[in-house]
Amino acid sequence: MTALAPTIEAAVARVAAGEAVSALATAHLDALARVGDSLNAVARLEPEAAVQMAARLDDLLPDHRGPLHGAPLAHKDLYGREGWGLEAGLKVMQGHRATQTATSIAALDRAGALDLARLNTVEAALGGEGLNAHTGPVRNPWNPAHVTGGSSSGSGAAVAAGAVPAALGSDTGGSIRLPAAACGLVGLKPTAGLIGRSGVFALSGTLDTVGPLTRTVRDAALMTNAMAGYDTADPQSVARPLVDHLHGIEDGLRGLKIGLPDSYFLDPVVPEVAARLDAARALFEAEGARVTSVSANGFETANRLAMLIIGVEAAAQHAPLLATRAAEYGPVTRRRLMPGLFQDAGAYLRALGRRASLLREALDGPFAQIDALFLPTWTMEIPTIAELEESVANGGKAAEDIGHCTRPVNLLGCPAISVPCGLTPNGLPTAFQLVGRPFSEPLLLRMARGFERAFGFLEDHSPQIRA
């Protein structure tokens, strides 16, 4: 029986050593079927297409191998592949099929990756909790009574359980970083414009970003290398020289400057999370980095503006369907979408206009002194499904609180990487974010890799449920 590949690097190495891509595909399809049952992580398996793709990749061996040749992946149910189902976690889109292949999926194809399945998501990708009234909640492999975070909930669960070594998510207000943190993974939200978004079901055309959830920092770099580039069909895409995100990744932390915000981000952090963050900061310093306090002025404003932009753009995206089929949306999703239909246009335009000035303030302020900001990802221990369902149903502030530390980064368009830093007393993972200047992904990856190597999270921790 073929063993599962724990990382992209391991899968690629095994194929290079002579293992058949078809054998890997079969093993990981079986694993996805298991976590689909146990964790509700899978929206749709695509076994026939996956087997055909694996056979084509085998035919190319040994002479032609891409950098991800044979890597078994599955992706959030927002990513189009022509002819495949694309439902975005929505009942109203049940049975819908994609008419184009997403730019990011085509890039992974060219790199030799396998595409095995689509993974469950929060309805319309609107929510950080990982709940979905239509498909049901995705369960966390560390403890299935707890949430995965969202909206890339299936991606977090499937990768953490080992069904695939990596998956694409999308991040509009934290939807890559939140499930990565809740599931003990690395989650990279790239700079706005680095990776093309065409062919991806949209939530907010201003703030959506494409990025990976992986088990290791090096795998996140590999995925970014494969996908970065100009997308002519994405108005946000930026044409710039390509870089190797693995270059310098093992250079360590000595001499780097990390900024610890003096307010806002740390204000709501519970003691159980604060203890792990303190230990992570101490490890950075022990590895030669310098941690200094910096002002966090303006980030509260960025959070509020991000919520306004997401609300208006998500409502506009769904307005035609809300007009005729609103009852097919879950009550929470409907409650979140409707206010955006009545938002003052002037407030929305002012919010868009503030983005550039807030970014300039950040670049002239904290980022002028440091290489990266050190922030929490979640400010609380990962809650149970029952706790969050009750809070959300009763109109609690759970969703707003969950994205407290992630949404401002989307508003600024900066890159951020979430890295696991241990378990809290409830046995669930917690994490920090490193946030950098635009297009500083190589430096963030180097810093994250330096911590990962020193801390050894994967070596010392494992979830309850494995594929």
Image (tube, rainbow, N blue to C red):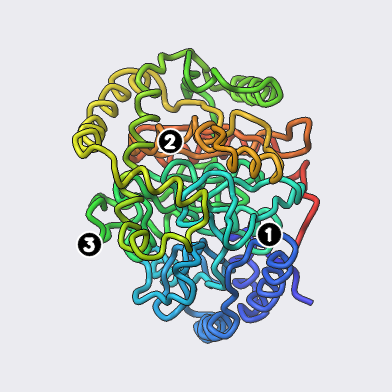
Q: Which quarter of the picture shows residue 312? A: top left
Give x and y (percent) for residue 350: 21, 32
> Residue at label 1?
6
Q: Is residue 244 above or below residue 49?
A: above
Spatial CA span between label 2 and label 3: 26 Å
> Residue at label 3?
232
Residue 201 shown left or right of residue 253 in the figure: left
Report crowding for label 1: few under 14, some 14 to 19, many 20 or more residues within 10 A (C-alpha): some
Give x and y (percent) for residue 234: 26, 58
Mark 2 residue type? Arg
Residue 5 shown left or right of residue 150 in the figure: right
Report crowding for label 3: few under 14, some 14 to 19, many 20 or more residues within 10 A (C-alpha): some
Name the residue at 32% across, 18% down: 365
Mark 3 residue type? Thr
> Residue at label 2?
407
Quadrant of the drawing holding the C terminus: bottom right
Name the residue at 45% across, 62% down: 78
Label 2, secondary structure: give it. helix
Quadrant of the drawing holding the N terminus: bottom right
Name the residue at 69% across, 53% down: 139
Name the residue at 61% across, 53% down: 156
Give x and y (percent) for residue 310: 36, 43
Query: Is 306 or 34 nearer to us in this picture?
Result: 306
Query: Is 456 or 86 nearer to us in this picture?
Result: 86
Query: Considering only order in the chain, which callout, 3 or 2, is on the residue closer to the N terminus?
Result: 3
Label 3, secondary structure: give it. loop
Mark 1 residue type? Pro
Spatial CA span between label 1 and label 3: 34 Å
Give x and y (percent) for residue 242: 32, 52
Q: Is residue 231 above or below residue 211?
A: below
Spatial CA span between label 2 and label 1: 30 Å
Q: Is residue 453 above or below residue 211?
A: above
